[in-house]
């Protein structure tokens, strides 16, 4: 039994950062990239399992929370939060393309309220999906909110308003500061 292993007795519980460090030398032959099909296999099988066990609303909440956690980590690890907004968003756009997550565009920004409209084309989550009649990028909602919250120090939320799965050809998000 694993609990009886003396080498595991005082082991610290791993968090997201620990798991992310493990990627640095684990795939010396295959490398760090994998096809979108594999990502979607993971994402949509988890989505189906959570929905069947907990219901759709709970699944959506879990995906948003996981995305938020990942967005916060991504901002802290891969982005320079000391940059001015225009430089920060340019860096975010570049990083998202480097990681092949999608092509980000800031469509509107209100400096007074902090409200934003962002779009992501070629989104790893949904580009190419059939028409489903609903938005599906809940993880991305959390991811963008986590990045914006980390950068601004203010609690952001993001809501997808257009999606490939609703017949659009980009995913569009409204981001607001939670009051």
Image: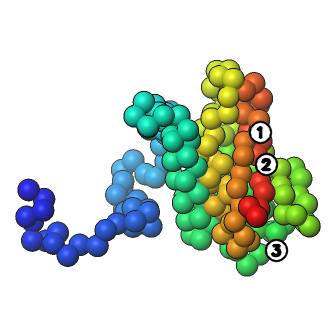
- Of the pair 126 and 46, the residue shown nearer to us: 46
Q: Which residue is mark 3?
A: 84
Q: In percent of the image, x 77 and y 54: which residue is there?
A: 175
Side of 164 relative to 61 (left or right)? right
Side of 12 relative to 5 (left or right)? right
Q: In percent of the image, x 9 and y 65: which residue is there?
A: 5
Binning the other alpha carbons within 10 Å of mark 1 as few (below 14), some (14 to 19) or many (20 upward) gives some
Q: Is residue 73 above or below residue 172?
A: below
Mark 3 or mark 2, earlier in chain? 3
Can residue 50 be seen at all in this image of the molecule? no
- Of the pair 96 and 178, the residue shown nearer to us: 178
Mark 2 or mark 1, earlier in chain? 1
Q: Where residue 1 sits in the image (x, y, percent)?
A: 8, 56
Q: Nearer the viewer, mark 3 or mark 2?
A: 2
* Secondary structure category for the residue under label 2: strand
Residue at the outermost top position:
131
Q: In percent of the image, x 66 and y 62: which residue is there?
A: 147
Q: Nearer the viewer, mark 1 or mark 3?
A: 1
Binning the other alpha carbons within 10 Å of mark 3 as few (below 14), some (14 to 19) or many (20 upward) gives few
Q: Is residue 167 above or below residue 147?
A: above
| Separation of marks 3 and 2 at Cα, in angstroms | 21 Å
Q: Where residue 140 sits in the image (x, y, percent)?
A: 63, 47
| Separation of marks 2 and 1 at Cα, in angstroms | 7 Å
Q: Which disc, if any, is residue 174? A: 2
For the C terminus, the quadrant is bottom right
Q: Is residue 68 above or below residue 127?
A: below
How many marks can you see?
A: 3
Q: In percent of the image, x 78 and y 57: which residue is there?
A: 176
Residues tagged 2 and 1 counted as in contact (Cβ below 8 A): yes
Side of 16 relative to 179 (left or right)? left
Q: Which residue is mark 1?
A: 161
């Amino acid at each position: 039994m694993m609990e009886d292993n003396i080498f595991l007795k005082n082991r610290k519980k791993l968090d997201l950062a620990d798991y992310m460090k493990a990627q640095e030398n684990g795939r010396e032959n295959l490398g760090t990239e994998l096809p979108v099909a594999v990502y979607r296999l993971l994402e949509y099988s988890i989505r189906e399992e959570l929905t069947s066990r907990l219901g759709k609303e709970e699944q959506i909440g879990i995906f948003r929370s996981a995305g938020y956690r990942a967005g916060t980590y991504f901002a802290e690890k891969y982005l320079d939060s000391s940059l001015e907004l225009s430089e920060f968003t340019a860096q975010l756009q570049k990083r998202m393309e480097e990681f092949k997550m999608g092509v980000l565009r800031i469509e509107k920004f209100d400096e007074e309220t902090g409200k934003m409209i962002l779009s992501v084309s070629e989104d790893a989550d949904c580009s190419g999906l059939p028409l489903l009649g609903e938005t599906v990028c809940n993880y991305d909602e959390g991811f963008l909110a986590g990045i914006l919250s980390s950068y601004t120090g203010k609690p952001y939320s993001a809501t997808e308003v257009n999606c490939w799965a609703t017949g659009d050809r980009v995913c569009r998000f409204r981001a607001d500061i939670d009051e």
